[in-house]
Image (spheres, rainbow, N blue to C red):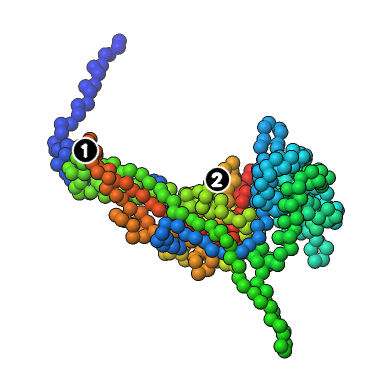
């Protein structure tokens, strides 16, 4: 016999006995934060770059006369597996610097022959006759020399756009003073000496260019390519002293201040009615200024006219020897200038360097810097700069000496401009439109200059991807 039980009554919610917090908030005054912005970064580059006041809006950089030697990067056009030399970029080869005949450059470009190489392949051997010029279209090669005790040494690393063996164009009977060995697989374009001679025999303009190059190369100059100042030392008696003068560049480079601008718009009703306890216009302007400063730092790094990456001299650029940044690479970068104040790198590059240092049992030192403990290498602060681009897993590390007195890198701006909010940045009232919107023109004026080439160096092709273990 089954016994039926009645279901238990559902539990009833307890009646509310006091005012809920949701309702209470209607009568409370909330505590508010200032508007926050994730885009704001440390901006070490802007903070540590010495800024020079440019009263006329243009900064003229005067230098000693230097003889142009080329050594830029040659460009290539690729269509599928076909690789061709871009003719105008052949002017980066020293002997063709300033050559104006595009038709002859096209003839030379057509005579380059593609050559594939594999890792470890020897392209030329030290002491062999220099019979061709190599342009590195893709990949990495090493210049191998002989040390004091006969051991092979890596003199330099060349990668995309570099060229070796251009002595073949000026010294037909020359011999390779070093060997060239492939560090990775890649593609090179080679121009045999007979092909160059064929174009040379048919072009009076090219013969004149070659003669002018040889004459300029023979001119007295120091190891930096500057016109020599004749001096005498160690003499005795009434020795005839050499006469000298310091020659200057006749057409020095001029830097005009660049500008980053935006129009800040604030509705008058918002500014009038909703500015307590925080001024709406003030915080709109504050965040706009932060965004402009971020863009300013980006331009100083990446601008094609005055940016640091674009204006580093080609002989101050080096490549990593193994891909990831190693202590050896940073030591070589620091050794290229008489003094280095700062190293700037993308945070991923700093992490990659840390991995390589840990792998070798070498550890970062730190430096007390502006109230912060920052990583350092050989006593030089290694500061993060997220504006340095990372493309296809590779980036760059920048080393610089700063200040006018030290012939370094300087920032350019103009202070005391009308309606100035911060040095070199102003906000100008533009009026109120027919929709009652208040408009302000917010502008930042800036540029950067490298006073002498060795003030700035770049370690290129820094691989930041974590290797598979």
Residue 241 place in picture, x, y as percent: 69, 81
For the point 71% across and 32% down, the residue is 81
Q: What quarter of the picture does the C terminus occupy?
A: top right
Cα separation between marks 1 and 2: 44 Å
Residue 419 place in picture, x, y as percent: 29, 54
Residue 235 place in picture, x, y as percent: 72, 84
Along the horizontal axis of the image, is 236 left or right of 66? right
Along the horizontal axis of the image, is 369 left or right of 426? right
Q: Which element type, helix, strand or loop, lies under badge 1? A: loop
Mark 1 and mark 2 lie on one chain; the one further toward the N terminus is: 2
Of the two numbered discs 1 and 2 in the rendering, the one whose residue sits closer to the viewer: 1
For the point 65% across and 72% down, the residue is 229
**Any part of residue 356 in sight:** no
Among all residues in the image, which is located at the extreme bottom?
A: 237
Q: Quadrant of residue 50?
A: bottom left
Q: Which element type, helix, strand or loop, lies under badge 2? A: loop
Among all residues in the image, which is located at the extreme front?
A: 204
Along the horizontal axis of the image, is 436 left or right of 171? left
Q: What quarter of the picture does the N terminus occupy?
A: top left
Q: Nearer the viewer, residue 328 or 281?
A: 281
For the point 50% across and 69% down, the residue is 405
**Any part of residue 22 in sight:** yes
Whether label 1 touches label 2, CB < 8 Å: no
Binning the other alpha carbons within 10 Å of mark 2 as few (below 14), some (14 to 19) or many (20 upward) gives: some
For the point 66% across and 69% down, the residue is 228
Residue 72 place in picture, x, y as percent: 65, 51
Q: Is residue 33 above or below residue 22?
A: below
Disc 2 designates what residue? Answer: 390
Disc 1 designates what residue? Answer: 436
Binning the other alpha carbons within 10 Å of mark 1 as few (below 14), some (14 to 19) or many (20 upward) gives: few
């Amino acid at each position: 016999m089954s016994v039926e039980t009645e279901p238990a009554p559902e539990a009833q919610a307890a009646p509310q006995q006091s005012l809920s917090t949701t309702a209470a908030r209607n009568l409370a005054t909330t505590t508010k934060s200032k508007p926050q912005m994730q885009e704001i970064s440390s901006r070490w580059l802007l903070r540590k770059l010495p800024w020079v006041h440019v009263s006329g809006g243009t900064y003229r950089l005067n230098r000693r006369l230097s003889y142009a030697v080329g050594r830029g990067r040659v460009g290539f056009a690729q269509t599928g597996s076909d690789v061709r030399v871009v003719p105008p970029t052949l002017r980066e080869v020293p002997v063709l610097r300033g050559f104006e005949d595009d038709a002859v450059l096209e003839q030379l470009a057509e005579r380059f022959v593609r050559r594939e190489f594999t890792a470890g392949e020897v392209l030329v051997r030290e002491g062999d006759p220099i019979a061709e010029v190599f342009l590195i279209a893709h990949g990495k090669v090493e210049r191998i020399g002989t040390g004091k005790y006969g051991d092979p040494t890596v003199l330099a690393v060349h990668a995309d756009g570099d060229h070796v063996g251009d002595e073949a164009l000026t010294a037909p009977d020359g011999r390779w003073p070093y060997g060239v060995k492939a560090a990775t697989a890649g593609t090179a374009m080679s121009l045999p000496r007979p092909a160059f001679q064929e174009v040379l025999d048919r072009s009076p303009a090219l013969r004149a260019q070659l003669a002018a190059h040889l004459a300029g190369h023979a001119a007295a100059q120091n190891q930096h390519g500057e016109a020599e100042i004749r001096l005498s030392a160690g003499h005795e008696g009434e020795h005839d002293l050499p006469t000298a003068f310091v020659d200057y560049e006749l057409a020095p480079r001029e830097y005009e201040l660049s500008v980053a601008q935006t129009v800040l718009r604030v509705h008058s009703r918002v500014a009038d009615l909703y500015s307590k306890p925080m001024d709406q216009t003030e915080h709109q302007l504050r965040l706009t200024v932060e965004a402009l400063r971020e863009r300013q730092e980006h331009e100083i790094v990446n601008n094609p006219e005055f940016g640091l990456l674009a204006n580093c001299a080609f002989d101050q650029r080096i490549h990593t020897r193994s891909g990831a940044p190693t202590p050896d690479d940073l030591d070589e970068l620091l050794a290229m200038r008489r003094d280095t104040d700062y190293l700037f790198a993308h945070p991923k590059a700093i992490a990659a360097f840390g991995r390589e240092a840990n792998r070798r049992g070498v550890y970062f030192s730190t430096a007390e810097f502006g109230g912060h403990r920052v990583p350092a290498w050989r006593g030089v602060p290694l500061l993060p700069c997220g504006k340095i681009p990372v493309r296809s897993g590779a980036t760059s590390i920048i080393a610089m000496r700063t200040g006018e007195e030290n012939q370094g890198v300087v920032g350019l701006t103009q202070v005391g401009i009308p309606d100035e909010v911060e040095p070199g940045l102003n906000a100008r009232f533009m009026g109120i439109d027919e929709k009652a919107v208040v408009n302000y023109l917010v502008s930042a004026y800036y540029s950067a200059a490298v006073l002498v080439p060795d003030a700035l160096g770049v370690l290129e092709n820094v691989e930041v991807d974590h290797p598979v273990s």
